[in-house]
Amino acid sequence: MRKQKILQAAVCLFPLFAGAQTTQKPNILLILADDMRGTTIHTAGVEDTYTPCLDALAQDGTLFTNAHIMGGTSGAVSMPSRAMLMTGKYLHTLQQEGAVIPQEQKTIGEALQENGYTTFHIGKWHNDTQAFNRCFSNAKAVYFGGMYDHWNVPLFDYHEDGDYSACRPIVKEWSKSNKVEYLPGEYVYSGKHSVDIFTHEAIEFIQAHKAEAAQQPFFLSLAYMSPHDPRTMPEEYRAHYQLDSIQLPPNFLPEHPFDNGELKIRDEMLAAFPRTKEEIRQHLYDYYAMISHVDKRVGEIVSALKEAGLYDNTIIIFAGDNGLAVGQHGLMGKQSVYEHSVRVPLIIKEAGKTPATSPRRTDKLCYLIDILPTLCELTETPIPDSADGQSLLPILTKDESVRDYLYYGYRFYQRAISDGIWKLIEYNVDGTRTTQLFNLQQDPYEMYNLAGEAAQRKRIKQLRQQMSRECETTHDPVERYWE
């Protein structure tokens, strides 16, 4: 197995070469994973995952180890997260929890189209179809929704009229009835995994636009549905792991110690109560295998860019829409403001840069909403007035901070503030208040609550004041129960 892994890893060690400066506008490839937490890229040095292709991509770019989402206003955290990513808007300025992106909130695709880009999408889209058509000028193999069976995904191609109401006929009880029912989607590649479908279409797009990219740059958005459950993948990716060797996280708990407001949501029902080590180990085994599947396909896409001669002049961004607990703190889902749920992977590979001889990483604080203004600056595209994010160019060029604090929220139950070292979480569930204070530098798994220590009273007061300021700045309508 070791020889097999070495051979597979070699495929992902992308050749390093100096990038010539070009006057052409750079292409953009945005790859978004679903439910992939920020510590699961192997080169981050936290979890023992097998991700040689993402490691190699980080070698050519910058790995952000402190990238976060702002949380969620819906149990389906992916929906507001993707709306924030595409618009650069604060969480609490979204419409209908991100289900609808209004016209006044300009998307990445709209801004780039105005700068001469062709915009193309493949994969998951968790927001409204009108915004989808504004953002992209074409698309293929699109899944409109939150989650589905990876082996039978209902797909649409692009419709200029914005009508994605087509349904497929199916006889569910064919042995008992002739009744025809209808399910959403124009077509299904039955038996082909979603990751493989979307990767194939991305490579087809790259090959088809090899010649055109010199005249018109592209923005290719690829949104995987993996590693979101159901946790199924081609069996070959399990071979990278041994079930009995999977390490449980230090903050594994059989159950969460108090009511955080969302202990019985769908994600939390994926494992029995109380959690057992054996069941969580199985979930991690499957989760990691799904991540390795995504990793391999990302490597194939990067190879396609290289073969087409487009890699050097393409900005590549790899990110996740939210994290996932999978047993940490006794939780399974992402409906919290713990690091495992709000910290996400982020790699930015710039265009026209000489790859580094060693991985470049930064622990500077940022949100995913900062991607939109960053892409605008990298492509000399005007930043939409509607965007709230901050460009990450100072981090990329000088490793200078763009944010001093990050502010998080989950529905009306949970709020948090962090300066990257200290993190304060406040809960208000049916009138019951709970406070947590963690030193992330000494306690990255958020295991030791210091809120009860007298020596921390001044720090808690200061963080609560900052939380109130961030609440106002981000237009959060929640009652400030921590003041």
Image: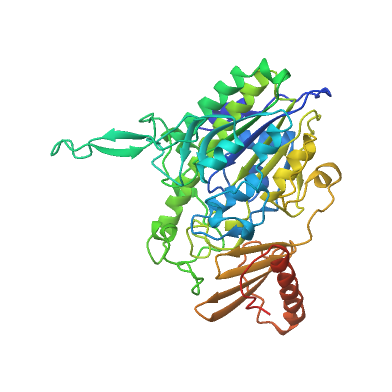
Quarter of the rendering containing residue 464: bottom right
Would you say 78 lies left or right of 270 here? right
Quarter of the rendering containing residue 220: top right
Would you say 311 lies left or right of 161 here? right
For image coordinates 70% across by 44% down, the residue present is 371
Note whether residue 262 is visible: yes
Would you say 69 lies left or right of 352 here? left
User: In the image, residue 212 lies at what x, y percent?
Assistant: 67, 17
The answer to whether 414 is drawn above or below residue 334 in the figure is below
* Farthest residue, direction right: 398
Quadrant into which the C terminus falls: bottom right
Q: Nearer the viewer, residue 38 or 174?
A: 174
User: In the image, residue 373 lies at what x, y percent?
Assistant: 75, 44
Would you say 230 lies left or right of 248 here? left
For image coordinates 28% across by 33% down, the residue present is 169
* Farthest residue, direction left: 176
